[in-house]
Amino acid sequence: MVSLSLLLFPACPDLLIEDITLESKTVIISVRSTKTSVQCPACARPSAKVHSRYVRVPADLPWIEYGVLLHLEVRRFFCQHEDCSRKTFAEPFPELRLLHRCPLPASPVPRVLGLDDWAWRKGRRYGTILCDLERQVPVDLLPDRDADSVVSWLKEHPGVEIISLDRAHDYAAGARRGAPHAILIADRFHLTKNFGDALEPLLDRHQDLFRFGEGVETAPALSPGKSLPPTEDLRPVPSKQAEQRRLAHREERLHRYEQVKALREQRLKIGAIASRLGVSRRTVERFLATGSFVFPQTPPQRSDQTRPLPVASSPAVAAGVSECQPSVARDHGVGV
């Protein structure tokens, strides 16, 4: 009968399973070697004198929904030969590293390719991950976020028809050069994030328009033929808190702008500046493209102190919003 050790570790005939336990969806397998002597890696002569023991805990592939950990007892041996440079050494288990030496399985060239950055070390070093969006699996990792790396990969893997990416210039330039016939689209995550980043300061400046609750009067519906009051009468007077937040945000952006300019004068690259300041490459590129810092304009105040009309309280307002949507889409169209 084949032992359990050979069933689980067929490439390691000298391993002995001493215990198997289950702890919170994790299978823990305690194993040790049965070899009586081990060769010294320096002089290749055997030694049977044990110096000490310790336990390694390498992770193995999961079994269905159960994680697997190996509690591997490792012995450290004395090398008893005086002419050897090694006094002690740990017994090796090269058979347990077979997975790392196996070649990656071949995968077809994706028809729909996703490009995005990922962190080797967050805030310091970034690479590029390429995913097959139809199969929803990663297909490769690139060491950096440069356009040339993207170009090289696409030329080595012809056949990509659609490329989904963020709005970074390097990725778009690399995609156009490496796959000129592919269709470039902006991915939904970055579109939503860009929209949210643009919408948040706008809503912050007009937060008094959205005060719904007890004690807030709603505007009556307008009779046919009547028009809304002038828009300047609906603009709120910013509260002290909103004004303080706006000024603090402006000072923070000015300070960041000055930092970007100073680091650029020290001949740092855009990626290095972004990593040092903890901002995106797009922010750095936008600051460098402007000759001077442009302060956000303060919204004009209304002349009276009357309560503003809630935006969603009047059918006429809703109709006006619907009418302006095509122009908003046209004026703020999304492109790569």
Image (spheres, rainbow, N blue to C red):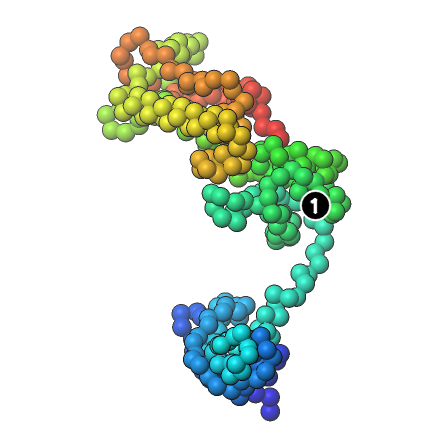
Give the residue furthest to the bottom. 1
Front residue of this view, candidates 115 and 230:
115
The count of marks equals 1
Q: Residue at x 33, y 22 (%)?
A: 247
Q: Residue at x 60, y 88 (%)?
A: 2
Give the residue furthest to the left. 215
Front residue of this view, candidates 87 and 253:
87
Q: Residue at x 47, y 43 (%)?
A: 123
Q: Is residue 76 visible?
A: yes
For residue 258, side relative to residue 115 (left or right): left
Estimate the x, y position of residue 222 in percent, counting from the top left: 39, 14
For residue 82, side relative to residue 54 (left or right): right
The residue labelled by disc 1 is 153
Task: Say which quadrant the C terminus sits in.
Answer: top right
Quadrant of res 245: top left
Estimate the x, y position of residue 138 in percent, counting from the top left: 61, 52
Quadrant of res 204: top left
For residue 222, side relative to residue 85 (left or right): left
Disc 1 residue type (three-letter): Trp
Estimate the x, y position of residue 266 in percent, counting from the top left: 50, 29
Estimate the x, y position of residue 140 in percent, counting from the top left: 64, 51
